[in-house]
Amino acid sequence: MNHSESDQVHLLSVTEAASRIRDGSLKPPEYVEALADRARRLDPLLRCIVTLAAETALADAQVTEHEILHGTWRGPLHGIPIGVKDCIATAGLRTTANSRLLIDWVPEKDAPSMAAIRRAGAIVLAKLNLNEFAWSIPSEEDLCPPPRNPWGPDHLAMGSSSGSAVAVASGICPAALGTDAGGSVRQPASNCGVAGLKPTHGLIDSSGAFGPPSICDVGPIARTVEDVALLLEGMTGMPGFVDRVKKPVRGARVGVPRRHIDEARPDPEVAAAFAEALLGLAQLGMEIVEVEVEGLADAAAADFLVLNVEAFAAHREWLRTRIVDYGPSARAYHTQGAFLSATDYTAAVRVGEVVRHRLEQALAVVDVLATPVVPVVTAEDARASKSRPHTGGTAIFTAPFNLTGHPAISVPGGMSAAGIPIGLQLAGRLGGDADLLAIACAYQQATPWHTMRPPLDAAG
Amino acid sequence: MNAPSTAWLRQIADELGLKLGNQDLARLRPMVADLLAVGRRLRLKDQRERPIPRSS
């Protein structure tokens, strides 16, 4: 690989890099070194990395090269450097969850999702920044201050898998893992112009990641939907997702929960991008129909009620013994569930049962639902919006699908006048992740948004 | 619904062995108020929609 090639490998998708690793034109050690150099150059600005694992990644890449040269090719993720949200346990590699509680914690075992993707051959290049324990308002006083959006470094990048979305959007790694309990994969993906999937609840074993167990899923972030499908295959060990995304989707029916969207009063730029996205889906031969799914706003609020109760339950002992090690926001966020009752929690779970049933009825008539991802454009807009409290607020479109377990993906769907990406959310049937990805992939291939790159390199 | 009192928050925190300072309690008060209001709304709706009676 000559110098100009090493300058450009950060532009490769996972699929493209895999093809070049397979044919020998891209050597995993050179690929890792090029991305590690890029990380060292960009991270002082972007702050998306908690731990850069360049040395271990290089050693893994050398083993990978040896295996491939000797005829052992484990599949398209073999030799692909990825980033991992730092609340997902990585054996032998520090995992902090961006908390002073875990500043020196080196797990002995991988989280199951991590182990699966390593078995598929992926290499961990970096552990990526997040809101403390994935549930807090980020601040400059955090163990690692919050990532900046590569599309506008004056802005943050939504959360909580902010580092994962920033690293992928900026070309530090071609793909990353995040976690999503209310929109934490989809919202930063939307805000950074990349694709992010919250799979059907339970499709991926999400134990070994900090998050409320009944609503949180590990999910992939990448620059293309095809790459998301590849990572899903790696994490589940189940083939078929990539083959399915290539199949035609003409005639698919797209449901729009119009009343729910309108009641959330999305920003005019978000509403305009969503209208244009629907037009794009229709131009692909899909039928757009309005649907009524009662209770989606309740489901968003109920998701956060469940989240708070489960967050307190998981952190109770640390809150009793090490409360001063939490940042002020994470301390409050993980404590608030202590003041709720079992009847509150049961009512929230019950909302999930009811709305899950209604969604399945709606999805018997349409193939996917379409909504915006976030009703506002920037992380700062989200925080400033007094009319959207933390109990559901800016997760009004994403959180319902955490509570009900349905798969949902954010794909690039527009750009604000100030140059900040705006995503389109598509949600599919329970277990219908492959069909969902196929429709998302068709949309992505017909639109230009995913080909745009943040202005990092132009700025030097 | 009124915001919970600081005294009530402190009582629950003490019972759970959580050493929360005044600033923590002040930060928590509106957040807990929001959550309690959501819980109450969801409980009432559940009671209205359930075909069988519940005691709470």
Image: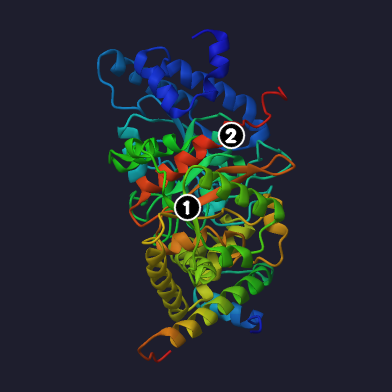
Callout 2, which amino acid?
Pro
Would residue A413 be found to the left or right of residue A405 on screen?
Answer: right
The residue tagged 2 is: A448
Outermost residue on the top side: it is A2
Residue at 46% x, 23% y is: A55
Residue A47, percent from left and from top: 63, 37
Q: Does dot 2 land on a helix, a strand or a loop? A: loop
Q: Nearer the viewer, residue A100 or A355?
A: A355
Would residue B2 be found to the left or right of residue A30 on screen?
Answer: right
The tag on residue A80 is none
The answer to whether residue A418 is visible is: yes
Residue at 49% x, 44% y is: A196
Q: Nearer the viewer, mark 2 or mark 1?
A: 1
Residue A131, percent from left and from top: 57, 50
Give the image quarter of residue A353.
Answer: bottom left
Would residue A8 be found to the left or right of residue A72 on screen?
Answer: right
Q: Earlier in the sequence, mark 2 or mark 1?
A: 1
Residue A368, percent from left and from top: 44, 54
Report the colour scheme: rainbow
- Vertical placement of A209 versus A62: above or below? below
